[in-house]
């Protein structure tokens, strides 16, 4: 967990710098939960009764992001450890790289969530390319693999249990 915490701190520092908040500490809570819990959150907050891999709960809308930066608070990121474990195993099976573990997958998903809190989105092809490029850069120190090589349909079509 120490390595994951250090990685996420580095990602937050980079996001803060990219957003022009270099003098302020940004606070984000990262929650590691079960599939059951993330499904409940997805249902209660998004109206989608299905498991997903990561959810972000910004404290401010993108148009009000500067208020979040001024306060130092961005929001919460919730990662399903069970889904992350399945996705890490799928990546290992697909690539043969035994070094791609749960820690790397959780770091990737948390990075994805942090970027959402910072106002990035992947709804349109142009914004998706920008967000994916940032993710690749931020996760590159952890793995030689491209986490986007894995089909992550959970973001577009949640998986039902």
Image (cartoon, rainbow, N blue to C red):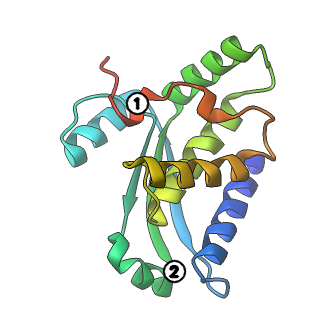
Q: Residue at x 31, y 33 (%)?
A: 39
Q: Residue at x 63, y 65 (%)?
A: 12
Where residue 105 sits, quadrant-wise, is top right
Judging by the rendered image, the residue that carries numbered circle 1 is 154
Q: Secondary structure at mark 1?
A: helix
Where residue 58 sits, quadrant-wise, is bottom left
**In the rendered image, the vertical position of residue 43 relative to residue 137, given as above or below:** above
Judging by the rendered image, the residue that carries numbered circle 2 is 72
**In the rendered image, the vertical position of residue 21 relative to residue 85, given as above or below:** below
Is residue 161 in view? yes
> Horizontal and vertical percent for residue 27?
54, 71
Q: Secondary structure at mark 2?
A: loop
Q: Residue at x 67, y 60 (%)?
A: 11
The N terminus lies in which quarter of the figure?
top right
Q: Residues within 10 Å of mark 1 (few under 14, many from 20)?
A: some
Q: Earlier in the sequence, mark 1 or mark 2?
A: 2
155 or 110: which is nearer to us? 155
**In the rendered image, the vertical position of residue 131 relative to residue 90, given as above or below:** below
> Horizontal and vertical percent for residue 150?
58, 25
**In the rendered image, the vertical position of residue 34 relative to residue 123, given as above or below:** above
Horizontally, residue 128 falls left or right of residue 16, namely left
Q: CA distance from mark 1 to mark 2?
A: 30 Å
Horizontally, residue 110 falls left or right of residue 40, namely right
């Amino acid at each position: 967990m120490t390595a994951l915490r250090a990685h996420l701190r580095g990602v937050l520092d980079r996001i803060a710098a990219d957003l022009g908040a270099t003098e302020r500490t940004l606070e984000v809570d990262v929650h590691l939960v079960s599939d059951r819990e993330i499904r409940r959150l997805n249902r209660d907050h998004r109206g989608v009764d299905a498991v997903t891999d990561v959810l972000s709960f910004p404290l401010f809308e993108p148009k009000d992001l500067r208020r979040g930066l001024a306060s130092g608070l961005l929001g919460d990121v919730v990662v399903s450890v069970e889904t992350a474990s399945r996705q890490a195993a799928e990546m290992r099976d697909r690539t043969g790289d035994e070094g791609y573990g749960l820690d790397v997958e959780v770091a990737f998903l948390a990075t994805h969530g942090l970027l959402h809190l910072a106002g990035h989105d992947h709804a349109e092809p142009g914004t998706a390319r920008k967000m994916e490029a940032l993710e690749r850069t931020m996760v590159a120190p952890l793995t030689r693999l491209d986490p986007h090589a894995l089909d992550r349909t959970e973001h577009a079509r949640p998986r039902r249990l």
